[in-house]
Amino acid sequence: MRADARRNRARVLEAAEVVLARDGLDASMREIATLAGVGVGTIYRQFPTKEALYQAIVTDRQERLAAMAEELAGAADAGAAFFEFFDRIVAHSTVKRILVDALASAGIDAKAGAPDIKGAISALLVRAQEAGAVRADVGMAELLALLSAACLAAQHNNWSDDLRTRALAVMFDGLRRPTSASGA
Amino acid sequence: MRADARRNRARVLEAAEVVLARDGLDASMREIATLAGVGVGTIYRQFPTKEALYQAIVTDRQERLAAMAEELAGAADAGAAFFEFFDRIVAHSTVKRILVDALASAGIDAKAGAPDIKGAISALLVRAQEAGAVRADVGMAELLALLSAACLAAQHNNWSDDLRTRALAVMFDGLRRPTSASGA
DNA sequence: CTAGAATCGGAATGACTGTTCCGCTTGGAT
DNA sequence: ATCCAAGCGGAACAGTCATTCCGATTCTAG
């Protein structure tokens, strides 16, 4: 692979991440190419299709996400680690539209080839539950549902840091204690 | 207004609701026209632009939403009314993509001309708080954030009835009691 | 029943999109 | 310094889409 090709590949990925973060899947290849300072043909040399480019970025994000989860899994305070992971992901998703889709797809259909995010998150959850910081009757399904919900809303409605903190505080309280009052 | 014009207007609205619910804003006018059994020109006679058609449906939904909130506001058990309202909206949003946008826009920027949904929801909240069913330290901002989050996720990830019930149960528990454990 | 205005259908328009193609440029091995 | 394949840019293509327009149709007042 020639030196300039590698350089262009990096530029394209960088530009694509910016544009996709802003416009989501509706981003146009032309705009990505312009921002990257290359022709559209150059993008297609590296990524056969728009979905492939999208997939490449998502995969990259998923790897970083899994790394973060694994890192936090080793923390001393399992409860704090769990809630911090949750908060950090939501905070990031305000800016990164793609992350949301990545998370959603990870939660709904564990895509082939995706790194083991679910495993890492599950470990965080189990440890927090063993430490008594999270109620025992929630599973991965509920957790991913809530996480995805928070990310989607944070991104869609541009949550401020303050609103995010307050909204998550309510969710976190719900995650701490099991039902006691009568349901609705 | 001619009789056939009125009939076509109704058909268009009905078809648009179906198609927009399925495809969101990406729905095409051609498809709506076909389903309604009219030509695209007929749509444009009634609605100057795609956004206007969209707006008409959203407004209609908002009105029904507000009506539901007001109806529940008179219920005997304020707590039950509050949680039922929340659940019903989320349940509907699984099917209706537009409702989500309507809610989001109502929560973020109270659009001019929109019926007083916020007022109705606020009344439900206050009454539930006075009844002791909802913690006193949540406001409309947090409530709308959580509601919008649940709707977005339910729609985006096609929550099953079961998952919705379980995920909302966690949120509801969070809405019931104020923080006691240390935060994250 | 008839005239004529309101309304209709759907082809045409113009502005987008993702993707392909090919003549030109350039890296890097010799 | 020379060469040529790998790589490049961006015009061209084929497909969308929302929106416009006008000849044909249909309603309704008289």
Image (cartoon, coloured by chain):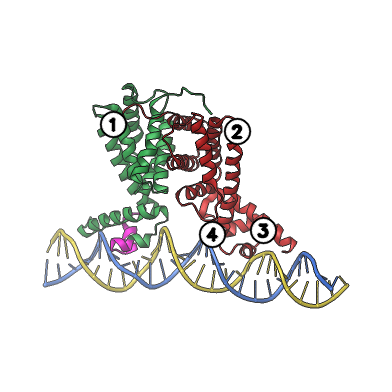
Chain colours: A green, B red, C yellow, D blue
Residue B9 marker: 3
Say which quarter of the image contains residue A112: top left
At label 3, the amino acid type is: Arg
Say which quarter of the image contains residue A79: top left
Residue B113 placement (x, y as % from top left)? 55, 55
At label 4, the amino acid type is: Glu
Around disc 4, counting alpha carbons within 10 Å, would you say few (fewer than 14), some (14 to 19), or many (20 or more)? few
Relative side of A179 to B54, left or right: left
Work out how far the residue at label 4 is from the one at label 2, CA to CA, in angstroms: 36 Å
Work out how far the residue at label 1 is from the one at label 4, CA to CA, in angstroms: 45 Å
Q: Earlier in the sequence, mark 4 or mark 2?
A: 4
Asked if labels 4 and 3 touch by Cβ distance under 8 angstroms, the answer is no
- Which residues are the magenta region? A33-47
Task: Give the labeled residue for mark 1.
Answer: A81
Label 2 resides on the chain identified as: B
Work out how far the residue at label 3 is from the one at label 4, CA to CA, in angstroms: 16 Å
Residue A72 in view here: yes
At label 2, the amino acid type is: Ala
Magenta region includes residue A34: yes
